[in-house]
Amino acid sequence: MLNKIKEKFIKDIRQAKDLKELEEICRCCLGRKGELTKILRSLKDLSGEERKEKGQIANQIKKELENLFQEKKLRFTNDLPHRQTNWIDVTAPGILPDQGHLHPLTLVQKEIEEIFQSMGFSVVDGPEVETEQYNFNALNVPKDHPARDLWDTFWLKDLDLLLRTHTSPVQARYMEKNNPPLRIIVPGRCFRHEATDATHDVQFYQFEGLMVGKKVSAVNFKGIIEEFFKQFFKSDVKVRLRPSYFPFVEPGFEVDVKRNGDWLEIMGAGMVHPNVFKEVGYNPNNWQGFAFGAGLERLAMIKYQIDDIRLFYSSDLRFLNQF
Ligand code: YSA
């Protein structure tokens, strides 16, 4: 299978008549949905030995094909008439400069914003350097509350400031300044003093959601979040809520989504705690609402089957060019 692919693309590269054709061949082979890329991605499903053996061969072939593409590309670009002589042919086709594009996380953020905006939510932001008051106290997590351990915090020395551990403080900031009813989402960068691994980093993005009204219920939450996932994953999805604990909601739940037969934990959520309403000056007897918070990288990783969060921050063009 691998050798067949190799032979096919070597032949195609040799026969390519111009740069456009060559680039199309390169895309079919090594692009995001390219034949070789698909095989490289599927390696993770193989057993240890087989993965190692097949992985070596596939990577070797990838290198060979990349070299061939480069060689042939050079031939086309060097062959342009204005390079062969010292006169300038103003009618010769120009060389397009490499074009930049948005980072995959920005693309996912924009997509999320558009889906929620279509359901009447406004996009709001807040500071990355936060006070203890908004990051914790206003969210029903007073000093010395054991729940503070849920968030490994970067404190700024000798100041009552920290790097926000989640986007939830913007809930309190927004409610303090705006009267209900309201619907907002808050995408933004967060920081945690955690060891880095394939799913955790010291900085990452979250997006928060908050909807407050006279009769906003958990049923509304489930409906809205189901619609969001349906549009985001572009397919019908099953969503389930499991009981969970966050100090700023009561009840709290974990939201799972079923993808390819497996339940995946996607976000924390719940009904806004009366203490949070009191803290921002709302009467909890008059208003109720839901809130949720999800990791942007996690959603992007599930959507695009990316297996390591560090790829987003590696500036590796082989990764970035696939989006
Ligand atoms: C819960 C209830 C609400 O009413 C509103 C918001 C929330 C979420 C809560 N503020 C929170 O931060 N929950 S969390 O600690 O579980 O983080 C939410 C998501 O952020 C995680 O599911 C994960 O996807 C992402 N995350 C957390 N730490 C991370 C991280 N992503 C990458 N690296 C880390 N270190």
Image (cartoon, rainbow, N blue to C red):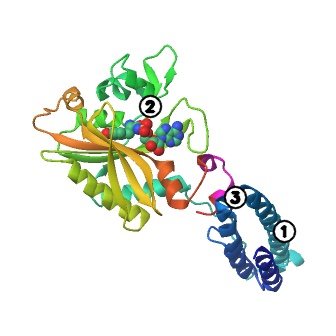
Measuring from the top left, give residue 105's x and y in whole percent: 52, 52
* Front-lying residue, 88 or 194: 194
Residue that badge 1 annotates: 64
Q: Is residue 284 left or right of residue 316?
A: left
Q: What range of the chain is rendered magenta?
A: 310-319
- Mark 3 or mark 2: whose residue is earlier in sequence: 3
Classify 5 as above or below 152: below
Residue type at mark 3 is Ser
How far apart are the two marked residues, 2 and 1, measured between alpha carbons?
46 Å
C-alpha distance separating marks 1 and 3:
25 Å
Q: CA distance from mark 3 to mark 2?
A: 41 Å
Residue 212 within the segment the image draws in magenta: no
Identify the main secondary structure in magenta.
helix
Q: Which residue is mark 3?
A: 47
Q: Amino acid at mark 1?
A: Glu
Q: Secondary structure at mark 2?
A: loop
- How far across and down, in percent of the image, does residue 197 sit? 61, 40
Asked if 34 appears above or below 309 in the picture, the reply is below
* The N terminus, quarter of image: bottom right
Which of marks 1 and 2 precedes in the sequence? 1
Q: Horizontal and vertical percent for residue 98?
A: 68, 64
The residue at the far left in this view is: 286
In the image, residue 264 sits, relative to residue 212, either above or below, namely below
Disc 1 residue: CB within 8 Å of ligand 1 = no
Identify the residue under disc 2. 164
Q: Which is more N-terminal, label 3 or label 1?
A: 3
Residue 280 can be seen in this image: yes
Q: Quadrant of ligand 1?
A: top left
